[in-house]
Amino acid sequence: MDSVRIREAKEGDCGNILRLIRELAEYEKFSNQVKISEEGPCVVAYGIYYFIYSTWKGRNVYLEDIYVKPEYRGQGIGSKIIKKVAEVALDKGCSQFRLAVLNWNKRAMDLYKALGAQDLTEAEGWHSFCFEGEAMRELAGK
Amino acid sequence: MDSVRIREAKEGDCGNILRLIRELAEYEKFSNQVKISEEGPCVVAYGIYYFIYSTWKGRNVYLEDIYVKPEYRGQGIGSKIIKKVAEVALDKGCSQFRLAVLNWNKRAMDLYKALGAQDLTEAEGWHSFCFEGEAMRELAGK
């Protein structure tokens, strides 16, 4: 797949990426949680990352989303996006690059492991917790 | 524990907080991962949060650390810190507030659940993955 170009998103890609965000939500079975709207033409894959803070390690990268359209899977595009994010992380002086994956998404888990990732939930027992909605408002007394 | 005051950290608290960060690392059995140094006097608890991005929900809060010195546990100080973070999250228009906890830390898990948090690893199967060190450099081709 030498013809696939991994590049930074531009403003004009917003519509394309939104369409993929919707596909990802559908794939992850969370379609009802997408709160954004807008449409546009087509790109085949995307990744969204941002910088996070770690008390022990300093600045790290978090890969919020990675998605490849079904008909383009198995061609190494996901690996190329991950490699690109690893480059960015190193260039910015980060010692880690993190992401979260659903445990039924064996294909993704196998890919990340094959690329050298560690499953911190399995290895160290990290669980992700979330407060939201009524529980959060009650906590805040609002 | 009406005498405990939950307040924002000031510059002069750095030494205090660092001491607690070390205690937290020891408690979580990760002492070898703390890469920072400096010492100072004593405070009894701390929380560190930052804002994160969610593709579906927009801006959220992530509570990176929460720690209460052992001799001050069981007095509701951890709950007060969590309530304060929930207030900040709502004030800043966030719909979620997230944190991670080790699965052997039953006391913390029970507290978060009692306060209304959902265990997303248990409920939805989210696993936390991490690339670092040699694996990250190899990925980036560096």
Image (cartoon, coloured by chain):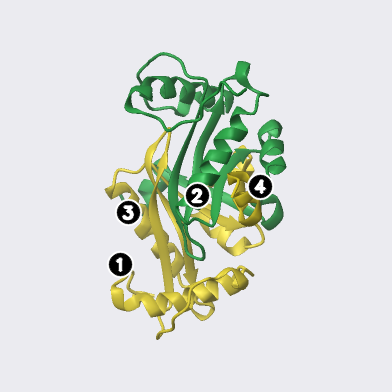
Chain colours: A yellow, B green
Residue assigned mark 2: B89
- Which amino acid type corresponds to the residue marked 3 in the rendered image? Glu
Residue pushed farthest top? B41
How far is the residue under mark 4 from the one under mark 2? 14 Å
Mark 1, Cα crowd under 10 Å, few <14 / some 14-19 / many 20+, is few
In the rendered view, would you say A123 is above or below B28?
A: below
Secondary-structure class at tag 1: loop
- Identify which amino acid the numbered label 4 is placed on: Ala
Tell me the kind of residue under disc 1: Glu
Residue at image position (49%, 69%) is A67
Q: Mark 2, residues whose alpha carbon is within 10 Å: few (<14), some, or many (≥20)?
A: many
Residue A87 image label: 3
Picture quadrant where residue B81 is located: top right
Q: Residues within 10 Å of mark 3 (few under 14, many from 20)?
A: many
Measured Cα–Cα span from mark 1 to mark 2: 30 Å
User: Distance of mark 3 from mark 1, alpha carbons?
Assistant: 13 Å
Give the Cα separation between the discs numbered 3 and 4. Answer: 35 Å
Label 4 sits on residue: B117
Q: Chain of mark 4?
A: B
Residue under circle 1?
A8
